[in-house]
């Protein structure tokens, strides 16, 4: 199947790093991927033989099916090391030509940061014209593959009445988990969602900090490890998660325990939507494999794979009805919006970690 060929290519790109060298002897910095035909990139990617990623674990947005397709159809091995967006960029920057990873998946705000730090490899893919302008860098240093909406996931075994709004949450008596705001894109957007709901915006995060400070002062802000295992065990009542993560986690929890009961709601006052983008490692030893991994992710099959993991594809592809039926009702998204001022948000993210520590965590009981 032609699209599966493209899929494998993308995964292969990531694999280049793990092997430690291009079969052609080229380094990523010496390769002009945008001048090459997909078929030629694929051939070199298959020689490179594997793809190693960061921040693209099996449990996130159904990456598992993408990696399985790549292995089954093309024999390309894969490993992932899960880490935050900031950690991914730091790894690429610190390892440089001793790179051990080929491709990463970072939050929308981190794509330009990675480009600015000089750790990205340009590749537009053959789907360039069908990718919205807001979702891509001019030269392909980063490309958004999917997006999500911030939600509240409630463990109904702990919380009898699941909050449907920020107001409901503030009036509760259970622990609330946000995550590492200093490093995790998902956690930062939870704060932005609260800011928007309370009258703020990308350039004015203060209402969101003020909101969570109230949670902290109530002794309800969970500062433990933000993990699927802790959520499943019932160590927190409500966790802020992208909709695709929350829906995916709930599915897994029910498989593990049919008695599990989790409810997912988009905050009624308003919420934020944002994408995640692939960055190819400028120093990768398998640049063609990395490029082909991205090629697959943007293909119809790759986009459907992400949708199976509840993520919203960035390209306008026709989804199977059974996939559409698994999503949250459209009416829940009525007051949600995409980032409107990316420049302001980019500036905010440079400060949000410190502000969170000073204005929220410092007040935790």
Image (cartoon, rainbow, N blue to C red):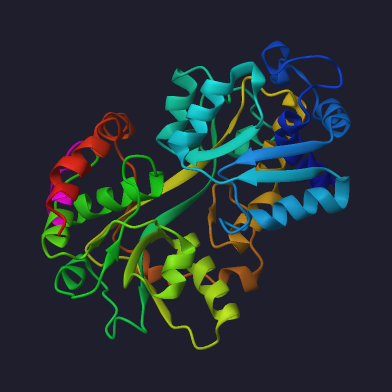
Q: Residue at x 68, y 32 (%)?
A: 125
Answer above or below: position of 356 versus 214: above
Image quadrant holding the C terminus, namely: bottom left
210 in magenta: yes
Q: Which quadrant of the figure has residue 350?
A: top left
Q: Which quadrant of the figure has residue 225?
A: bottom left
Residue farthest bottom in this picture: 259
Q: Nearer the viewer, residue 98 or 323?
A: 98
Estimate the x, y position of residue 170 in percent, counting from the top left: 16, 68
Estimate the x, y position of residue 227 in percent, counting from the top left: 45, 59
Q: Nearer the viewer, residue 76 or 345?
A: 76
Estimate the x, y position of residue 204 in percent, counting from the top left: 17, 39
Q: Residue at x 46, y 45 (%)?
A: 275
Answer above or below: position of 166 versus 19: below
Taking 309 as reference, is 344 left or right? left
* Whether residue 42 is visible: yes
Q: Which quadrant of the figure has residue 78?
A: top right
Taking 259 as reference, is 303 left or right? right
Answer above or below: position of 87 versus 24: below
Per the picture, the main secondary structure of the magenta-coloured stretch is helix
13 in magenta: no
Taking 310 as reference, is 215 left or right? left
Q: Residue at x 25, y 34 (%)?
A: 348
Q: Residue at x 65, y 43 (%)?
A: 298
Q: Which residues are magenta?
A: 203-211
* Whether residue 1 is visible: no
Taking 350 as reference, is 15 left or right? right
Q: How many marks?
A: 0
Estimate the x, y position of residue 278 in percent, counting from the top left: 57, 37
Q: Nearer the viewer, residue 257 or 296?
A: 257
Answer above or below: position of 152 versus 184: below
């Amino acid at each position: 199947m032609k699209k599966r060929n493209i899929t494998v290519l993308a995964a292969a790109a990531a694999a280049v790093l793990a092997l430690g060298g291009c079969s052609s002897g080229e380094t990523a910095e010496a390769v002009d991927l945008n001048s090459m035909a997909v078929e030629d990139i694929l051939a070199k990617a298959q020689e490179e033989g594997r793809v190693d990623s960061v921040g693209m674990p099996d449990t996130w947005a159904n990456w598992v099916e993408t990696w399985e397709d790549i292995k089954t159809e093309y024999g390309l091995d894969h490993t992932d090391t899960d880490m935050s967006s900031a950690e991914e960029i730091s790894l690429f920057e610190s390892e440089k030509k001793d790179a051990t990873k080929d491709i990463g998946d970072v939050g929308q705000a981190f794509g330009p940061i990675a480009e600015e730090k000089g750790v990205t490899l340009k590749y537009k893919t053959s789907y360039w014209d069908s990718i919205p302008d807001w979702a891509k860098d001019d030269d392909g240093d980063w490309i958004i593959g999917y997006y999500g909406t911030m939600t509240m996931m409630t463990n109904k075994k702990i919380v009898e009445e699941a909050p449907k709004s920020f107001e409901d949450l503030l009036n509760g008596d259970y622990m609330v988990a946000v995550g590492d705001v200093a490093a995790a894109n998902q956690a930062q957007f939870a704060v932005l969602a609260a800011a928007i709901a309370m009258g703020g915006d990308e350039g004015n995060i203060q209402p969101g900090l003020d909101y969570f400070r109230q949670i902290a002062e109530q002794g309800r802000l969970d500062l433990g490890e933000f993990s699927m295992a802790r959520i499943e065990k019932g160590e927190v009542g409500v966790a802020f998660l992208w909709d695709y993560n929350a829906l995916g986690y709930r599915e897994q929890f029910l498989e593990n325990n049919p008695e599990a009961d989790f409810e997912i709601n988009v905050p009624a006052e308003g919420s934020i939507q944002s994408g995640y983008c692939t960055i190819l490692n400028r120093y990768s030893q398998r640049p063609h494999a990395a490029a082909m991994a991205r090629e697959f992710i943007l293909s119809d099959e790759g986009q459907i794979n992400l949708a199976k993991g509840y993520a919203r594809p960035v390209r306008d592809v026709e989804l199977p009805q059974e996939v559409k039926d698994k999503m949250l009702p459209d009416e829940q998204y009525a007051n949600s919006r995409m980032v409107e001022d990316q420049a302001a948000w980019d500036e905010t993210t440079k400060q949000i970690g410190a502000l969170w520590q000073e204005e929220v965590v410092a007040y935790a009981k």
